[in-house]
Image: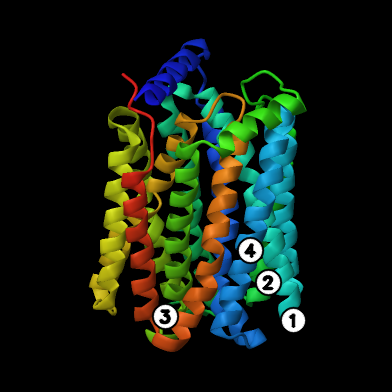
Amino acid sequence: MAREATVTSAATAEAAEAPSESPRLMIGLSAGHAVKHFCQGSLLILMPSIRGTLGMSDVDVGGMFTAQQISSGTVNAPAGILTDLFRRRVALILTVSMVCVALAYFFVGITRWYGLLIFAAVILGAGTSLWHSPAFATLASRYPERRGLAMAAHLTGAQVGDTLAPVLTGLVLGGITVSTVVWGGFHWRSVALFLVVPAGLTALLVATFFRSGAVGAPQVSLRQYLAATLRLSRNPGVLGMVALHGMRGATHSSFQIFLVLYMSDVLGYSSLLVGVHISLLTLAGVVSTPLFGAISDRIGRRPLIVFNMTAVAVIIGSFTWIEGGWPFAVMLALLGVVLFSVMPTITAAAMDVTEKGSEGTSIAMMFAGGAVIGAVAPVAAGAINSSWGFQGVVLFASATAAAGVVTAIAVPMARRRR
């Protein structure tokens, strides 16, 4: 209780010191996050076509996404260090992030062998992770009284990208037939090369216009940083959010990857129809994410996290008997209400128990630790899918979400500020 009261008092004092911030920074970072996730989400829709061309097995597919997860987790640590030590260079880190995404799709577009595809996945994982620490840490520091809302707004940008990517990529990849007009779409290599453009353009815009994004805390020395990091590594609240973030990510990745293959291979859906269904996973979250984030600022993080993770476990479990048709689409939409909207609440809960000046490292720990926990999920799901089919993957993902519910009940969290 004393620890929670101390955290609450520190957070209140921090908010009192912070100047009122314009929402422009929040909006700009959210827009960049949308582009990042558009590019990141497009790879999933390209996957069935890539697999067919390169002759990949289910384990090969899972291995590619595991390589991406490992890269993502590894890069998070230096990203957090750079964010906290070089607060006035966050624009450079964000620019490098998008350059890596552009390079990754260039390699995807030209690859003729699996090894280069793995390398592209590694570059993509690194690029997407470089965005997290500077963006989230800046928002956490600039908007202390609206932290849940700021995290949610940023994740809403991600959901916009995740919603548009499957539909637009599926349309451009698979083409469309309207009356007598038939368009066959583009080859997946061309689509991958097209994606270099938005990533590169975003890198240019960030480098040109993002001038005032320094995290709002005084510069710290390396010695001070290391001492703060040591304290952070012993913080049970942050460590609990690391575990919870990993379980949510493992649930998401293992289910979504093989959901795409199930719709393509078993249900026989076209690329466009697969994209439409995947977009349902994020479409409803565009509204629910900021709503849940704002609610968590008022009633506390734990109730929202427990509710969301419980709903995820139950809804994913329902796919053991729902095999297609409109019930399939409806349940995907319902899953979209809760699957992504819990992420900003978990992030905000970690920020609530992080001392000022260590926000970047706290974010890095959460995403890096989450990547380590979730790295084995795609390969495990691939092995399960090969042996027991999609129903086995469903049970695996549902069980992982249920473990997240237990974790959310057990880990310490800061009390709601009054």
Residue 387 vertical position relative to residue 31 in the rendered view, above or below: below
Q: Dividing the picture into quarters, in which one does residue 40 lie?
A: bottom right
Q: Sequence order check: which comes first, mark 2 or mark 4? A: 4
Query: What numbered label is drawn on residue 68?
Result: 4
Callout 2 secondary element: helix
Color style of the picture:
rainbow
Q: Hey, what amino acid is under mark 1?
A: Trp
Asked if the residues shown at circle 2 and circle 4 are in contact, with their CB atoms under 8 angstroms apart, the answer is: no
Residue 353 is situated, as x and y percent measured from the top left of the image, at: 47, 30
Q: CA distance from mark 3 to mark 2?
A: 24 Å
- The image quadrant where one finds the C terminus is top left
Pointer 2: what residue?
190
Residue 59 is situated, as x and y percent measured from the top left of the image, at: 57, 81
Residue 4 vertical position relative to residue 406 in the rendered view, above or below: above
Q: Nearer the viewer, mark 3 or mark 4?
A: 4
Q: Nearer the viewer, mark 3 or mark 2?
A: 3
- At a point 47% along the width and 75% down the height, the residue shown is 381
Q: Sequence order check: which comes first, mark 3 or mark 2? A: 2
Label 4 crowd (10 A; few <14 / some 14-19 / many >=20)? many
Whether residue 404 appears in this view of the structure is: yes
